[in-house]
Image (cartoon, rainbow, N blue to C red):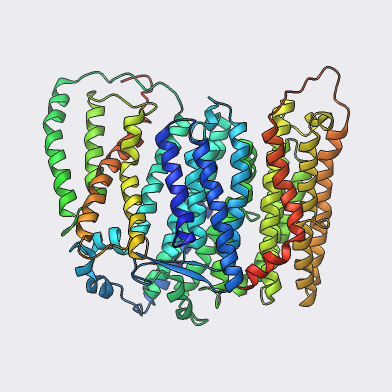
Amino acid sequence: MRRFLVIAFAAAFAAALGSAMLELAPSPLDLRIPVAAHLAQSGVSHPVTAVLLNYRGYDTLLEIAVLLLALLGILAVVGKDNPSPPRPAHPVLQTLARLATPSIIVMAVYLLWAGAFRPGGAFQAGALLAAAAVLLHLVGLLPAWSMPRLRLRLGFVIGFVVFLMVSTALLGQGALLKYPAETAGMLILLIESALTLSLALILAGLFLLLSRDQGGA
Amino acid sequence: MTDPLIWLIVLPLAWATLAFALGPGRGAWVAMAGLLAQLWLAFALAQKIGAGGAALSHAVGGWGAPLGIDLAVDGLSAAMLLLTQCVALPLAVYARSYFKTGDPAGVWFWPLLGFLIAGLNALFVSADLFNIYVTLELVGLAAVALVAAGGGAQQVAAALRYLFATLLGSGAYLLGVALLYGAYGTVSIATLTPLVTGEAPRLVWIAGILMVSGLMLKTALFPFHFWLPPAHGGAPAPVSALLSALVVKASFYLILRLWLGPLQPLLPVFAWGMALLGAAAIFWGSWQAIRAVKLKRLIAYSTVAQLGYLFLIFPLLANPAALKAGVIQIFAHGLAKAGMFAAAGVMIKATGQDTVAGLAGAVERLPVTLFAFGLAGMTLMGLPPSSGFLAKWQIIEAALAQGYWIIAVVALAGGLLAAVYVFRVLRQAFLLAPEGRAMATVPRALEWSAFALAAASVLLGLRGVELMRLVGGA
């Protein structure tokens, strides 16, 4: 009965939303025009990167804080539990993972570099590196993490710290995150490189800190 | 120091990161130094706006809306910023003594506190609906992590329930923002406000309802309050204080912003519905507080009731006094509830029991704490000269001026019910302790920071005029 009510409610909501969408007129403002018009001053030539790191860079700054916070939340709950012992080695999988890792790293660096002019950027590159760490962990080459030491903690925050320091230093230009047009490209690359490292560690941490084997496999 | 409003966001982010890098259990001094500087900044900002009466704004990135993100501070935001720093600093002093070294609940308290305060400050100054969503996530995640930190299975379960509620709330808000963006092509509040009219398409109505319902869930308005008592009642005392005093107010502030800003042509249809739920919250929350067995449950249900008063102002908003009444109620409840949770934490630490019945004899050993509890209770009941009195007086006056005597009756009845549950605690504390019951000694800093918060909630009643002038300029 309860399930039926929930389904009925969801269906009614979807129908109302769908029918309302159909009668929608085109919006009076088209942000694509100003995005394209200021692309030359933004320091990058790909509109998505320009929005993420320049026009709405402040959103991205806070998003990185949200990711750090997710990691902190896990640390606060996991506490000092001992992580699981390394998984049993499986020679074929380990060899495959060893072969895949270098090309994943090359791919991540390419994505970071490509972000300036085509789809790519720090988030994608960081996610790829984190995937490599998870892969290595699953085949037993990388142990799970427990309470992070200073070096790892610095790795977690370095991207955010660089981003925050650049944003604040740019107050000298008159506003938070106001890049001067001539150095914007370089500053964005600096921020993205630091972010790639931190995002890779944070995303890998979300997995490796929670890795607990139940009964072993 | 070009812009105090920027530093109110950058500073807590900086000290939160530093506290995290310093390691588990570290960072208390950095946090307190940062909070002290922020308090000064918030005062400077409020003074600037109170004197000039004009809103301040800052275009992040120098682009300006709608391409970039704008930050804006008016009297209402300045008041919220001031409350946030005023509550956070004494609670930081309290928390430093509360979490003994090695307490698993306090290991990551300082970085979490920094991100929470940064999120709140960023929320209060943002003038961009999508950016507000990001700040909501920051506040929500930090709050959930603080509730869950180092707790047992029950506390983690409460935190998880809180997480689902807060994610559903911000998810509904985000869907509403996406629909508004689809309809108007912008998420800037200033650009959006003139575009929305009473003849808005159906989609905009759906968006408005989604956003406000999501925020109501996050504010724990009756009947969406189910997540609040376990989360606020189960968390460590300094965390409960932060959540009840500040976090639920952030989403209420946002409802008020939408109501007075971009959604003004649509939402007033629902004003009486909001007031009805507010009245139900007052009665239901008070009733549950009167029946509660555990002390912190009682205080958490009292939060449900006190939040109800905030929703009584919606039918009255045509009268500018109603907004002032709402802001004073936010301040009164924020300071009093922070003081009350802090005092409860002291009593629970000293008696080793978390029930109301376990308080017998507390008056001999903890006179300062009990005095703090009584002062905070005075504000919740609305006795003069506390700020709670001022808030209720303003609500009743605005209600009678517009002929809505029913709202005045609800406000008065709520005060009486508050008296019942406050005196329930005080009476128990004045009973003789059972034979042979020893009480643990508690650090002085705990007692006095609780007292400072509770006393501030009463003394604010004497300086409420300045606060009202600040908001009046909005």
Confirm whether residue A1 shows in the render: no
Where residue A166 appears, as percent x and y from the top left, is 31, 53
- Left or right: B457 in relation to A49: right
Residue at x-position 67% and y-position 57%: B331
Residue A205, by quadrant, is top left
Residue at x-position 38% and y-position 45%: A67
Where residue B254 appears, as percent x and y from the top left, is 55, 62
Confirm whether residue B401 shows in the render: yes
Where residue A213 appears, as percent x and y from the top left, is 36, 23
Residue A41, by quadrant, is bottom left
Q: Quadrant of the C terminus of chain A?
A: top left
Total marks shown come to: 0
Residue at x-position 81% and y-position 52%: B417
- Left or right: A125 in relation to B204: left
- Left or right: B392 in relation to A213: right
Q: Who is closer to the viewer here, B344 or B162?
A: B344
Q: Who is closer to the viewer here, B423 or B446?
A: B446
Where residue B67 appears, as percent x and y from the top left, is 33, 70
Q: Who is closer to the viewer here, A21 or A55?
A: A55
Position of A26 relative to B237 (above/below):
below
- Left or right: A50 in relation to B135: left
